[in-house]
Image (cartoon, rainbow, N blue to C red):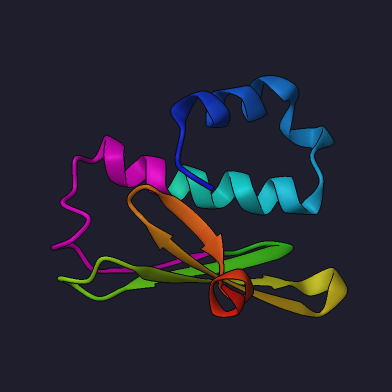
Amino acid sequence: MLFSEAELKKMIKHGLKKITLEEEIKFNILNFIHCIHLNRQDFYKASFDSKLFGNIEMTFKKEANCLIGHCRTIVKKQNRVIDYLFTENGYEHLKEVIKG
């Protein structure tokens, strides 16, 4: 999914208490990308090693001078791990990229 500030605002307007698991993951990834934009970081040059804790744990990792980062999502209630690739423009489910 491509990053869109409008999409992020639409999700917030919809109400974060009523969102599905997939929507919550989507929101967290888009919000992380949005924070990079807000901080005016050079995505390519920057490295990331960030963690989000809670019922859905997320780690965002990217080496400096790389175009693509990795996001690992752990859904504790379902004992499930989901991997995503992210760029400054959005994210993709890793399994979809491998299939393609």
Q: Is residue 63 above or below residue 1?
A: below
Q: Is residue 68 magenta?
A: no
Percent across and percent down for residue 26 are 62, 49
- In this rendering, the count of numbered labels is 0
Q: In this view, does 15 lie above or below 59?
A: above
Front-most of 98 and 35? Answer: 98
Front-most of 50 and 36? Answer: 36
Percent across and percent down for residue 88 are 32, 51
Q: Quadrant of residue 19?
A: top right
Q: Does the magenta stretch include residue 47?
A: yes
The answer to whether 28 appears left or right of 79 in the picture is: left
Percent across and percent down for residue 28 are 57, 49
Q: What stretch is highlighted in magenta?
A: 33-52
Q: Residue at 37% x, 69% y: name it.
A: 69
Front-most of 45 and 2? Answer: 2
Q: Residue at 16% x, 52% y: name it.
A: 42
The answer to whether 22 appears left or right of 37 in the picture is: right
Q: Residue at 62% x, 23% y: name it.
A: 10
Percent across and percent down for residue 74 are 68, 73
Q: Quadrant of residue 96?
A: bottom right
